[in-house]
């Protein structure tokens, strides 16, 4: 696989399955994650092929088991998929008539494959590494 882009974003991730926090704190964390991912895509202006592989790596002082690791990337995965496949974003309407983007449906297709990992970081160091790969094999064509 050929690496297209790599970002290391200063984002703290926690297991969504085990979090017991106020809804406003959770919303603020999700909005911060979305803003970081949006910024990375807008600032890099990369062209992506039809199919890609995205590797999400959590960098933190404490390790999570695999179920909680995947759960901690749920919103980041949705936001990355919304940036890669913007045509799949669904617009929903609240009771008061306000429109908003619902990015939770963008990762349904088979155009993106996902991988998860984690690395040990220094105390109080939290980050997410997002790597995007072209999964097509690289052929060496030579005229001998």
Image (spheres, grey):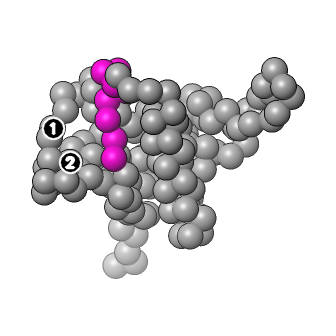
Residue 27, percent from left and from top: 52, 36
Predominant SS along the magenta part:
loop
Q: Residue furthest right?
A: 97
The residue at 73%/32% (across/down) is 90
Using residue 133 as the reference point, say whether residue 97 is left or right of it: right
The residue at 19%/53% (across/down) is 124
Residue 23, percent from left and from top: 49, 27
Q: Are marks 2 and 1 in contact (CB under 8 Å)?
A: yes
Magenta region: which residues?
12-19
Q: Secondary structure at mark 1?
A: loop
Q: Nearer the viewer, residue 137 or 40?
A: 40
* In the image, residue 49 above or below residue 62: below
Residue 78, percent from left and from top: 53, 37
Q: Is residue 13 magenta?
A: yes
- Decide: few, some or many residues near mark 2? Use Cα within 10 Å; few <14, some 14-19, many ≥20: many
Is residue 3 among what the camera can see?
no
Cα distance between the residues tagged 2 and 1:
7 Å
Is residue 97 among what the camera can see?
yes
Q: Nearer the viewer, residue 118 or 54?
A: 118
Q: Nearer the viewer, residue 137 or 36?
A: 36
Q: Nearer the viewer, residue 100 or 6?
A: 100
**Quarter of the image that includes the N terminus:** bottom left
Q: Residue furthest bottom?
A: 144
* In the image, residue 43 above or below residue 136: below
Residue at image mark 1: 63
The residue at 73%/42% (across/down) is 87
Using residue 68 as the reference point, say whether residue 75 is left or right of it: right
Q: Secondary structure at mark 2?
A: strand
Residue 88, percent from left and from top: 69, 37
Q: Is residue 144 magenta?
A: no
Residue at image mark 2: 60
Q: Quadrant of residue 98?
A: top right
């Amino acid at each position: 696989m050929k690496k297209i882009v790599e970002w290391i974003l200063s984002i703290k991730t926690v297991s969504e399955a085990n979090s017991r926090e106020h809804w406003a704190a959770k919303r603020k964390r999700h909005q911060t994650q979305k803003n970081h991912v949006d910024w990375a895509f807008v600032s890099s202006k990369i062209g992506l092929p039809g199919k890609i592989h995205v590797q999400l790596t959590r960098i933190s002082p404490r390790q999570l088991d695999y179920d909680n690791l995947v759960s901690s990337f749920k919103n980041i995965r949705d936001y990355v998929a919304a940036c890669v496949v913007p045509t799949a974003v669904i617009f929903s309407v609240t009771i008061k008539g306000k429109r908003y983007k619902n990015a939770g449906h963008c990762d349904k297709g088979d155009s993106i494959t996902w991988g998860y990992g984690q690395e040990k970081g220094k105390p109080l160091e939290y980050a997410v590494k997002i790597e995007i790969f072209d999964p097509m094999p690289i052929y060496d064509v030579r005229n001998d």
